[in-house]
Amino acid sequence: MGKSINVALIGNPNTGKTSLFNRLTGLNQKVGNYPGITVEKKEGICKLSPRLKAHILDLPGTYSLNTSSLDESVVVETLLNRNSKDFPDVAVVISDVENLKRNLLLFTQIKDLEIPSILVINMADRMQRKAITLDIDLLEEELNTRVVLVSARKNQGIDQLKKAIIEYKSLNTKPCVNASSIDPEYFDNLKKAYPKQSIYKLWLVITQDVNFGKIDRNRDLENLKQASFEVKSENDLKKLQHQETVVRYQFINGLLKKALNVDQSQAKDLRSRLDRILLHKVWGYLIFFAILLLIFQAIYDWSSYPMDWIDSAFAKASSWAQTTLPAGPFTDLLAEGIIPGLGGIVIFIPQIAILFLFIAILEESGYMSRVVFLMDHIMKKFGLSGKSVVPLVSGTACAIPAVMATRNIEDWKERLVTILVVPFTTCSARLPVYLIIIGLVIPEGSVLGGFLSYQALTLMGLYLLGFGTAIFSAWVLNRVLPIKRKAFFVMEMPAYKVPMGKNVLITVVEKTKSFVLGAGKIIMAISIVLWLLASHGIGEKFTNADELVRAEYAGQSLSEDELNDKIASQKLEYSFIGYIGKGIEPAVRPLGYDWKIGIAIVSSFAAREVFVGTLATIYSVGSDEEETIKNRMRAEVNPILGGPLFNFASGISLLLFYAFAMQCMSTLAIVKRETNSWKWPAIQFTAMTVIAYFAALAAYQLLS
Amino acid sequence: MSDTIAHLKRGERGTITSFDEELVPLKLLEMGCLPGNQVVMMESAPFQDPIYLNINGTHLAIRRETAQVIQIERHG
């Protein structure tokens, strides 16, 4: 058994912190949440030497310790709480050689907390190309630290970093900037009142509440606000924070004047050439639109092969279980409840993975910030921020991470509006519903010489409908909500980078896994409940279905198969679920649905993706044949009008219902947490469901 | 009337002289937007909003409203 130390990775966004984390831990990492909040917690293990392991915590990216968001406050909380099990033995502060000036601001703050710190200068492989030279000795001396040059991307300098971490006890913990010079008298009094605490730690606790409230902190600092010394007003504290920033930059600019040299004449800039094109007033928007088109085509086309394969594999597995295993309730549950239910989840793994793949590439390459830049002016008009584009685009994967991605929007009103409208974007849970319905009701065929199929165009139309509704609702909300808008907006424009395969892969695997596991649990539970309800019932018509049906059709010469079908459908009709479905039917009939679709809709209020699994479960109860879900749905007949149940009118009606309805409990829970009130999710749920019902009603009545 | 960042055209540069601290978020200061630091105008989106700048070596984007309250002394 070796010893283990805590290492915290801290740094500005876009410094390659995640690449370094992946380098140090490999796949030996886990992603969870900080207790009670939805901030992602990434941890991993790194073997430093045969006898020493490092427990590495990848803290959220932050520009400073002056917190203004939940993500950033996690960083401060971790660094302030010495009693926490996550408190670092050593802080590894990551900076980017091209943005050293800005990155050092955070470093000098961490140094002031007197935590042993190592300064990592990442992307060192760019130094030669950018004609950058550094005086490492001078940096180490003036910053009282160890400096390690690293290229996480090229896997250089990692061993030196590990060595520096091993020797963490020899690190100098003396601060390098004297922050108390901004108001010596105030800081003197502070020191007198709390002689045992580090002065900068006290300052952080006091100022944290200025920008960000409601944080639990350790008890010894609890009483600080009722301190006996002079209490500053919020405005004065803000002014002091400004001055603190000025003092730090004076120190950093002075230091880098001596230690950093950039030969501008040699620096060839890829950034400005790419920006010229990608931010162009015409080309910029066309390129963005083309990329979106590519993504949708990919989701539809590339994923259809694995999806067909998965669909028929599960149908085979189901009939295998039915024929091979000994007959009985367990086999029925497996073949008719669990396997079709599981199939309903597994089938959309390809699409989720493709979506997350594109989003990860756009983020990693630095292009996403350009999109934000291009869109801000337009989004501002609708009450949103350019930064709302990221939630709206990642909302096409899942609304949950999208709601969390609103945290970097500075303005509260813009952020709230974004959270409220994000669930309109077409999340991947809607995809299986869309795909199966489109496959049933939209004819095959194509335009533009076979490049775009009608089915792909319909899917694209549904995505645009989602975006359009989101934007329009934002415009309405911006006018209606009585909240003042400050319209602050600051965004870093990162350098362009070729996305690193390993980073992209880890993101895709992690996100897909957590999504499928999260949704999977709900779907499994619902499938089992549905199967129980569908295969049990009371009353003579259920228990004696066999004899009753045989008696009824005694005069007609039906084959055994046809008779079995009649028996199965009568049983289903008089099972528990049949009764529930009949109860709902009056509400859904005007929309063009039968009671089976009604059941599928009600169960998908837990999560949309349940729809396909539910229909699969309902339709496969009592059927022994090996058939895919799609074929079973195609064969369904409208009990009243005759003809296929899934026709153009009812299909469009269903598509619209799923486009608008708020059918996701997890999203409502996240909205509650992020807005700190049940009011917003309640409004969201009611408004969206009402819109969905009437849109579906209008569509069916007009089209049929 | 002195110049503000919003007056800069693409490729033009200046030195930040002053601004009203109430109207500028702390985050912008942390990114290096401080009196005495140099600012270069890189690109602007249609309607000159938002504006893409290089301030003190950091590349960042801000809205026109904010750019209009940051006073500068123009170079050349």
Image: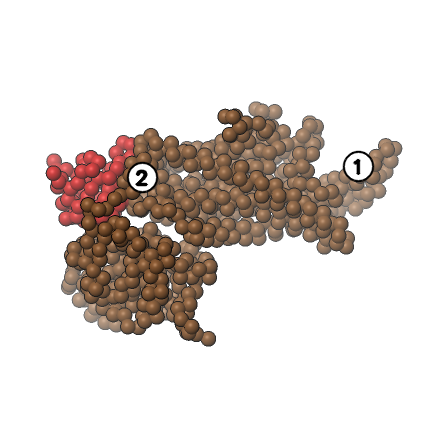
Chain colours: A brown, B red
> What residue is pinned by disc 2?
A274
- Residue A458 location, x and y as percent? 52, 31
Which quadrant of the structure image shows residue A100? bottom left
Q: Residues within 10 Å of mark 1 (few under 14, many from 20)?
A: few
| Residue designated by label 1 | A562
Residue A389 lies in what quarter of the image?
top left
- Is residue A514 or residue A290 the one in the foreground? A290
Does A43 sit above or below residue A485?
Answer: below
Q: Residue at x 57, y 27 (%)?
A: A445
**Quadrant housing the C terminus of chain A:** top right
State if disc 1 and disc 2 touch (CB < 8 Å). Answer: no
The chain under label 1 reads: A
Residue shown at the point (27%, 31%) measured from the top left: B47
Q: Amino acid at mark 1?
A: Glu
The image shows residue A327 at horizontal and vertical percentages of 77, 53
Task: Tell me which chain the residue with mark 2 is part of.
Answer: A
What amino acid type should be assigned to the residue bearing mark 2?
Answer: Leu
Q: Nearer the viewer, residue A264 or A510?
A: A264
Who is closer to the viewer here, A183 or B52? B52
- Image height of A432 relative to A182, above or below: above
Q: Could you say where residue A469 lies in the image, as x and y percent from the top left? A: 45, 34
Question: Where on the picture, by quarter, is residue A378?
Answer: top left
> In the image as oriented, which residue stretches furthest toward the right?
A555
